[in-house]
Every structure is written in C-alpha cells, then in structure tokens.
Image (cartoon, rainbow, N blue to C red):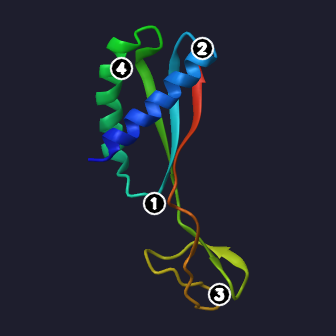
Amino acid sequence: MHEIGIMEETLNLAIDYAMRENAQEITEITMAIGKMSGVIPSALEFAFDVIKQSSIDRYPSIIQKNMSLKIELLPIICYCDSCQENFNPDEWIFQCPQCHQFSNKIIQGKEIKLTSLKIS
C-alpha cells in the first residue's frame, strides 16, 4: 500500500510548513488526487488515520486528534491536437468526442498534491 508512504511524506511537508510559520496546530490538510494517480482515496484516508496517530506522539503540539483530511478528486483531462481543445475522456479511452482522434496528451489526472493547509 503506497498510500502510507504518500501520506507520511505529505504529513512531513505539512509539519515542516507549520513549524516554519510558528503555527500552533494543523487543523486540516487538503490534497488533490488525480483519477490516474494510482492512489485509492479510501486507502489514503486509512493511511492518514494511521500516520496521524503515530505523529501525535512525535509532534503533540502541532498534530491533534481532530486534524482532518480533505481529498479533492481530479478528473482526467486530455488535449486534442486536431481540435486544439481539452476534453474529458470516457473511461480509459482517450478519444476526442468532437473529431474522434485518439490523444496521448494528458493535461490533468495524474496529480498527487498537497494543495492547502489550515493552521492556527
């Protein structure tokens, strides 16, 4: 389950940022996860709960039990060279709905990002 490693790194980034900002605590972490990222949102939520518990002991002043994780799921967006337009493909076939050409240019959908933190 690579979600544990992803969550460990994300939480480390959040803690580093909160410490640099002299924050008292992190209340919410928001991540953007692309549909093609290979990350299973429920597994990421489970990993968050596990990592949060172990981090409370190491960083009791920054990590609290009420810290939450918000996940924004990003759809796949492709670019069509023929139409010069972005499109949302149906399932895993990246075919332009206008001209029916296939595309291998994925603009969005592979991301795994820490997008925001709520700190106090």
* Marks 2/4: CA–CA distance: 18 Å
Residue 95, picture quadrant? bottom right
* Marks 4/3: CA–CA distance: 50 Å
**Earlier sequence position, callout 4 versus callout 3:** 4
Point 31% across, 47% down: residue? 2
Question: Residue 24: x percent and y percent?
Answer: 55, 9
Q: Quadrant of the C terminus?
A: top right
120 relative to 45 in the view: left or right: right
Point 38% across, 52% down: residue? 39
Does 83 sit above or below residue 34?
Answer: below
Identify the amino acid type marked 1: Lys
Identify the amino acid type marked 4: Ser
Q: Which mark is residue 55?
A: 4
**Earlier sequence position, callout 1 versus callout 3:** 1
Residue indicated by mark 3: 98
Identify the amino acid type marked 2: Ser
Q: Depth-wise, is mark 1 or mark 3 nearer the camera?
A: 1
Identify the amino acid type marked 3: Gln
Point 36% across, 20% down: residue? 55
Mark 4: secondary structure? helix
Mark 1 surroundings: few (<14), some (14-19) or many (≥20) residues within 10 A: some
Residue indicated by mark 1: 35
**Earlier sequence position, callout 1 versus callout 4:** 1
**Earlier sequence position, callout 2 versus callout 4:** 4
Q: Depth-wise, is mark 3 or mark 2 nearer the camera?
A: 2
Question: Residue 16: x percent and y percent?
Answer: 53, 23
* Marks 3/2: CA–CA distance: 48 Å
